[in-house]
Amino acid sequence: ETGVTQTPRHLVMGMTNKKSLKCEQHLGHNAMYWYKQSAKKPLELMFVYSLEERVENNSVPSRFSPECPNSSHLFLHLHTLQPEDSALYLCASSQEGHEWGARGYTFGSGTRLTVV
Amino acid sequence: GNSVTQMEGPVTLSEEAFLTINCTYTATGYPSLFWYVQYPGEGLQLLLKATKADDKGSNKGFEATYRKETTSFHLEKGSVQVSDSAVYFCAQTPNTGFQKLVFGTGTRLLVSP
């Protein structure tokens, strides 16, 4: 399997639930990202991992907790979410380093999250 | 800081019409520039890119030219199809250091038969 795979595709969860989103890349990339896409709002970069270390956390509430156990996998752990957290969560990967950034990112298809 | 500005949508066209979606950027140095497309219910896909001034990226009939003098990277297509209906994102990344992608807000294109 190639590319970036996200599971599940759809998730409905209550505000007291704990769930996790999974992202897996088979491209040999060394950087991975979580984005949030809400209706009528720009793409929001949430977290960046480079070489399995978190290099950016854009003031994301602590109810979102990322985990990057290795360069191929990225998780987003969710707990006590709010209805306004309902959105499409996109994972992406890239190969960072000289000249590699010009290749851009490869995105997964996203997880559509609904918080009820 | 680095930023990308796109024209607001939606852009509504009839099939076979000419398409232009404007994109301008601000950056330190000379970034790489990209257009991504998002079809309904999907993630973002790289449509085309240009890595230096005067480069032209092209794919699936879409084109964009990296214009350093006007800091622009406008997306064009000579004859749109209904299947081109999607949201288009302009983006940039620096060519040195950690290459974080910065997106515009996206422009929705609606093509009617």
Image (cartoon, grey):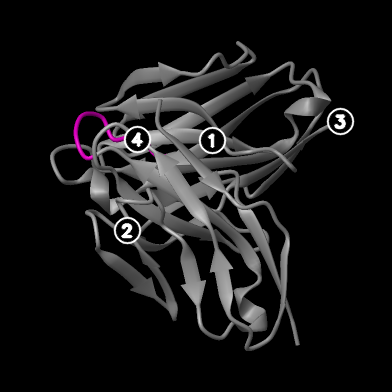
Q: Residues within 10 Å of mark 3 (few under 14, many from 20)?
A: some
Q: Is residue B42 visible?
A: yes
Q: Please identify the quadrant where the N terminus of chain A is shown.
A: bottom left
Mark 1 or 2: the one toward you = 2
Which label was assigned to residue A35?
Answer: 1
Please state the horizontal and vertical placement of residue A97, each as a whole percent of the image. Answer: 16, 37
* Marks 3/4: CA–CA distance: 41 Å
Callout 4: few (<14), some (14-19), or many (20+) C-alpha neighbours within 10 Å? some
Mark 1–mark 2 Cα distance, whole angstroms, equals: 26 Å
Magenta: main secondary structure equals loop
> Label 2 crowding class (10 Å Cα cut-off): few <14, some 14-19, many 20+?
many
Q: Amino acid at mark 2?
A: Tyr
In what element is the residue under mark 2? Answer: loop
Q: Is residue B98 on the magenta stretch?
A: yes
Magenta residues (range): B95-101
Query: Is disc 1 placed on a helix, strand or loop?
Result: strand
Q: Residue at x 51, y 83 (%)?
A: B78
Q: Secondary structure at mark 3?
A: loop
Position in image of residue A8 (x %, y %): 61, 45
Query: Can residue A27 be seen at all in this image of the molecule?
Result: no
**Which residue is labeled 2 in the image?**
B66
In the displayed structure, does residue B46 sit left or right of residue B13? left
Task: Give the Cα distance between marks 1 and 4.
Answer: 22 Å
- Indicate the chain on which mark 4 is placed: B
Mark 3: amino acid:
Val
Kindly report which numbered mark, 3 or 1, lies closer to the viewer in this rendering: 1
Q: Which residue is mark 4?
A: B27
